[in-house]
Image (cartoon, rainbow, N blue to C red):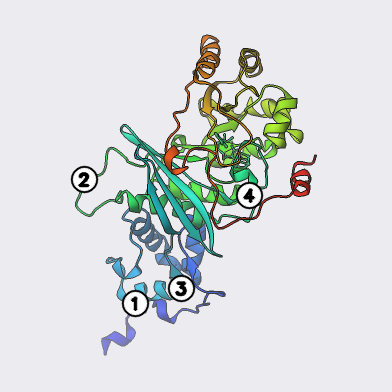
Amino acid sequence: MTQINAPVTPDVMTLPRKLPEGGKINIVGLTRDQLREALITAGTPEKQVKMRLGQIWLWIYHWGVREFSDMSNLAKDYRALLAEYFVIEVPLVVNRQVSSDGTRKYLVRIAGGHEVEVVYIPEAGRGTLCISSQVGCTLTCSFCHTGTQKLVRNLTAGEIVGQVMLARDDLAEWQQPGAPKNEVRLLSNIVLMGMGEPLYNFDNVRDAMHVVMDGEGIALGRRRITLSTSGVVPEIARAATEIGCLLAVSFHATTDAVRDTLVPINKRWNIKALLDELRDYPKLSNSERITFEYVMLKGVNDSDADAKRLVQLIKGIPAKINLIPFNEWPGSPYERSDWDRIEAFADIIYNAGYSSPIRKPRGEDIMAACGQLKSATERGRKSAREIAAETGA
Ligand code: SAH
Ligand code: SF4
């Protein structure tokens, strides 16, 4: 009978609980704070929540576990409770193609039946995952395949983190119990250079990157993440202060007249406005150089005069210039610059003191190269009127 007077430990099953409306909550993509709140709502006693959160986080993001029933250091009742409230879901890979150069392209399906593409590029001693932030894009860069597709919707933070997780599944890169910690990572870097404009889905991209950077989980450092933007000037400083990742800018032209046609967001924020904003980025984010992406289009932006203007324009900004040979897609209105031209352009930049790597086209045989991504399910094409409205023309 001594039991009767013993202090009562709060039992998770007896606390008031509110079942999630509209189905179970996907844990993937919740920030630590959001997950903490969700665990409390589900009935986790406040006193235990810190420990439970830490355990669940490790299971999901360190060990790659997808079932609560496998979380062996949690009580059986608690695992059942979690399964009642939550799921651990990543987007479904509906097609996987491997290029002759080892590049892997995944077509993944997300809620609503939409599809986005994810590309893994293996390199010596490392590997880069190119992830998408939107289905389609509101912008209409004239050389970009995604730009011909309407914006369908923003991806959720869970769908963005999920792209990293499904690639780690495919690469079998989750930590195995008892195995030594991986020193060399197959997936060591992330670039937000897939479909969509990441700065137009800022909050979800930021939350997703915080999950990916978390040291108790996937643990990719902030300098291993590069966000590429077409130049959404008012959001650039937030990328520095709220994410702290590296920045790449789709520059592509050295006069406003040409940039207006290639990257129409230039009509809203022109070259001067963009460069003024970029000058503060390295200090704000405490990082090194900004990458200026420059797609090489025959006879459009590839002259010696362009190269000279480019180095003048970026003077004073710690930068490297990444030259991207144009990747053609069916119906694309441009041609790739000749190789001699690209090299001559690179030389001028290099001689002015900037690093000027030429991006090696990867995965061309499976249409996985930069700017070729477009989901197969969304056939909607922008009308001339929509394009004019979106670009403020
Ligand atoms: N929306 C963002 C990120 C996605 S695009 C942005 O525009 O920066 C990633 C990079 O691929 C950008 O520099 C983009 O300009 C470039 N790109 C788009 N289409 C391309 C193509 N067909 N060939 C080469 N690069 C392309
Ligand atoms: Fe959108 Fe970037 Fe393509 Fe421009 S280059 S249409 S911003 S995805």
**Residue 93's spot in the image, x, y percent?**
42, 57
Q: Which residue is mark 3?
A: 85
Q: Residues within 10 Å of mark 1 (few under 14, many from 20)?
A: few
Kind of residue at disc 1: Asp
In the structure shown, which secondary structural element does the residue marked by tag 4 occupy? loop
Ligand number 2: quarter of image: top right
Q: Is residue 173 above or below residue 2?
A: above
Instruction: Of the two numbered discs 3 and 1 on the same chain, state the one appearing first in sequence.
Output: 1
**Residue 356's spot in the image, x, y percent?**
50, 19
Q: Which residue is mark 1?
A: 77
Left or right of residue 250: residue 109? left
Q: In what quadrant of the picture does the C terminus appear?
A: top right
Kind of residue at disc 4: Gln
Q: Which residue is mark 2?
A: 180
Q: Residue furthest top?
A: 351
Q: Residue furthest bottom?
A: 1
Q: CA distance from mark 1 to mark 4?
A: 47 Å
Mark 3 vs 4: CB contact within 8 A: no
Q: Residues within 10 Å of mark 4 (few under 14, many from 20)?
A: many
Instruction: Please state which of residues 389 and 285 is positioned toward the viewer in this rendering.
Output: 389
